[in-house]
Image (spheres, grey):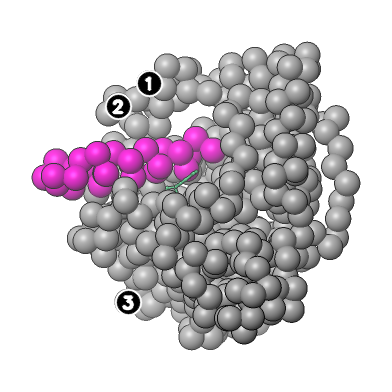
Amino acid sequence: MYNKKEHIVIVWFKRDLRLEDNEAISNAIASGKRILLLYVFEELLLNDTHYSKRHWDFIKQSIVAINTKLQSYNTQVLAVQSDMISVMNKLQELFFIDTVYSHQETGILITYQRDKKFNRYCKNNKIKWIENINNGVQRGIQNRLDWGIQWEDYMKTNTYKFNPQKENFISNEVIENINKHFKTVSLHTILKTPFQKGGRQMALRYKASFFEERYQNYASDISKPQGSRTGCSRLSPYFAWGNLSIREVWQEAKALRKVSPKKRTLDGFMARLRWQAHFIQKFEMEYVMEKASVNKGFHKLKKKISQEFQEAWKTGNTGVPIVDACMRCLNTTGYLNFRMRAMVVSFFTHLLWQPWQEATIHLSRQFLDFEPGIHFPQLQMQAGETGINTLRIYNPIKNGLEHDPDAAFIKAWVPELASLDTRFIHEPYLMTSLEQGLYNFRLGEAYPYPIIDMKLNRKRASDTLWKLRTDKLVIEESKRILLRHTLMNRKTRSS
Ligand SMILES: Cc1cc2nc3c(=O)[nH]c(=O)nc-3n(C[C@H](O)[C@H](O)[C@H](O)COP(=O)(O)OP(=O)(O)OC[C@H]3O[C@@H](n4cnc5c(N)ncnc54)[C@H](O)[C@@H]3O)c2cc1C
């Protein structure tokens, strides 16, 4: 049973679901008080449309992996469904809670508001809340002077080893009793799915196979929709939910770089590890990006919403094969490489001329690696609404031909085109009725005509967006964004 007089500390897991290189846990151990490890399946997030079952399953698998490792310490994560303040109120009836340890979270507006509320709660209840920095993202900074150097310095610091004593933790028997006061959550998930599985062990396997072999093809495969599935690291969900820290992977890549002949490839990979924090830092410093373009000059851009276009895009029925293959693949597997993500967003915002805000929910629900701090800034950048980045209106046909030349990816995801000759698969609408007859294929029946005129719509997007870039407010805002969000001189020690 529990000793009501006991002073304990809590580690509040959020997007840091690991025991190793977890500063919050190390700080809790150093406190010398017994630790309760806590994950709250928060109703505010369970009900939030950006999240979907694939995320919750990944989280559950991550907690199961932590619990497996904790068996030898006779403890487990208290996993409950509620809101943080109700959980704390209940726990305060059972213990004296001295401190809550957690990583800083750069989340969506509702988690930001929850954190502010929780901060007030802690103050009112005389509980210390100690939040540590997450993957080098800094809180409260006003510009990026020296940010690159500081990020790199952070990456070079020692990782935290998980090496506690059994006595550091509240025991399993006590947690069983605590459970009775809460709505607990079954951590069971179906493992036979097309998604990457959560948990530290899986993360380590992906990391090992990447550094042992797969990274060799990183540079050549990164833009290919099919090749990237093995040539890229595939570590993004493990970073997004915290099964791995960026620091431990960066240090391993740096060590490998010393002995590997593929130094430039590893430089490319390590630069992307920095982009992870670079994008999250933008969002940390400008959280309004969840709803509105960071460049206020673009707020005057009005696009007519078409549910029909949006539905065709979401379900992979636009009549543009590479776009449809990407969307179907994403919906089924939770993954797309960077270039194809950028391309489908460009298709949505430029060619279908839909507001980027209308794409956020569908994409965040599908991306297994949904990370708000990358997701929202990337969407705006790809939509061409930052004013500071090169405007890229992707030509889907050109991208398909370049990165899926034998149409293997399209054939896999748009099977209705699989029997066509490769030269028609990228543009089935170019087939004459005679050719359609030869392949026993009827455009408009087996597969839709393109829902838009790509050439015409590309021109409209290009003309409108280039014109807007000469707008006074867009220019003023671009200057502000450059000062606040760009890396001055792109200074880093390794570059
Ligand atoms: C519209 C759009 C939305 C995106 N949303 C997300 C998201 O929610 N979560 C997410 O993790 N990534 C997002 N990305 C970035 C990128 O596409 C993925 O990080 C990458 O494809 C993941 O695959 P990987 O782990 O194999 O990457 P690798 O190429 O192996 O890169 C290693 C790591 O670097 C980071 N990284 C790579 N590319 C980028 C990038 N362009 N920007 C920031 N960090 C990067 C990721 O953490 C990634 O795991 C988005 C990109 C676009 C265009």
Q: Amino acid at mark 2?
A: Ser
Is residue 14 depicted above or below 296 in this figure?
below
- The residue lying toward the viewer, choosing from 490 and 128, is 490
Residue at 27% x, 55% y is 217
Q: Secondary structure at mark 2?
A: loop
Residue 268 drawn in magenta? yes
Is residue 356 depicted above or below 478 in this figure?
below
The circle drawn on residue 495 is 2
Contact between labelled residues 1 and 3, with CB atoms less than 8 Å apart: no
- Which residue corresponds to mark 1? 491
Q: Nearer the viewer, mark 3 or mark 1?
A: 1
Q: Residues within 10 Å of mark 3 (few under 14, many from 20)?
A: few
Disc with the residue nearer the chain's start (3 vs 1): 3
Q: Secondary structure at mark 1?
A: loop
**Whether residue 304 is visible:** yes
Q: Amino acid at mark 3?
A: Ser
